[in-house]
């Protein structure tokens, strides 16, 4: 589990293909690794297999490469890094699993005083999970949805986010890893609506006992 607060900017120094899988070596300032520990690389949860004084190595399966933008990072390209959340630590962003739900694209970046407004487009299956003032993870960065309409949403990058992440350097057309709020996924499943995997609330497609009518009757709507 992660918070979506980027700790370090790493550099991809080596990518070794192994059939459909790959091994990635990333240089960074992290130290004192534990074998198998989780590190989010551009929002993708990966396990450390070995390390040196200046880098760590992780394996990426064919599924990971197909469902994320990791394979598009060039050698020498920089990536967002976050080590797994320690129990008892402050959660400054929101609860992030590191399991990417889909790949979206940058539509535009607009100046907004010292801040930057960034507009993204998402795959259709992710659109229902976007809500103004809700949470979204973009390349491992916890952000607040400013506005959402159709397949698009926008966020505002404050100066510290611009300084500590690579988001402000993304150009229109760039692809980014997206993880929607896990709480939104559970609510959708309880309501019997298809989730990001297209699976309804039970194997037979029957809605759960939680309905909009029940919520309204209970005073939640």
Image (cartoon, rainbow, N blue to C red):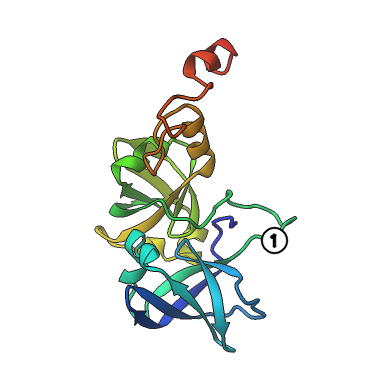
| Whether residue 35 is situated above or below residue 115 in the rendered picture | below
Tag 1, which secondary structure? Answer: loop
Q: In x, y percent, where is residue 115?
A: 43, 53
| Whether residue 65 is situated above or below residue 158 in the rendered picture | below
| Whether residue 55 is situated above or below residue 98 in the rendered picture | below
Q: Is residue 13 visible?
A: yes
Which quadrant of the view contains residue 174? bottom left
User: Which residue occupies the foreground of this view, 21 or 108?
Assistant: 21
User: Which residue occupies the foreground of this view, 200 or 81?
Assistant: 200
Q: Residue furthest top?
A: 217
Q: In x, y percent, where is residue 150?
A: 29, 35
User: Which residue occupies the foreground of this view, 28 or 118?
Assistant: 28
Q: Residue furthest right?
A: 88
Q: How many marks?
A: 1
Q: Is residue 130 visible?
A: no
Q: In x, y percent, where is residue 8?
A: 54, 71
The residue under the point 60% across, 56% down is 1
Q: Residue furthest bottom?
A: 53
Q: In x, y percent, where is residue 85?
A: 64, 60
The residue under the point 36% across, 61% down is 68
Residue position for label 1: 86
User: Which residue occupies the foreground of this view, 207 or 133?
Assistant: 207
Dot 1, crowdedness within 10 Å: few (<14), some or many (≥20)? few
Q: Residue furthest left?
A: 173
């Amino acid at each position: 589990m992660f918070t979506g607060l980027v700790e370090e900017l790493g550099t991809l120094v080596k990518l070794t293909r192994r059939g459909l899988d790959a091994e990635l070596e990333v240089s960074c300032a992290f130290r004192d690794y534990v074998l198998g520990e989780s590190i989010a690389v551009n929002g993708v949860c990966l396990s450390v297999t070995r390390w040196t004084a200046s880098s760590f190595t992780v394996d990426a399966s064919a599924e990971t490469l197909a469902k994320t933008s990791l394979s598009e990072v060039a050698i020498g390209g920089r990536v967002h890094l976050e080590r797994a959340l320690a129990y008892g630590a402050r959660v400054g962003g929101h609860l992030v699993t590191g399991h990417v739900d889909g790949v979206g694209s940058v539509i535009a970046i607009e100046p907004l005083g010292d801040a930057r407004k960034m507009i993204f487009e998402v795959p259709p299956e992710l659109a229902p999970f976007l809500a103004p003032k809700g949470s979204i993870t973009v390349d491992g960065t916890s952000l607040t949805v400013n506005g959402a309409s159709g397949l698009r949403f926008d966020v505002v990058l404050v100066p510290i986010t611009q300084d500590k992440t690579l988001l402000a350097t993304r150009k229109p057309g760039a692809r980014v890893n997206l993880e929607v709020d896990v709480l939104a996924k559970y609510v959708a499943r309880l309501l019997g609506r298809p989730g990001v995997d297209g699976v309804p609330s039970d194997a037979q497609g029957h809605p759960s006992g939680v309905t909009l009518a029940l919520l309204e009757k209970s005073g939640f709507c």
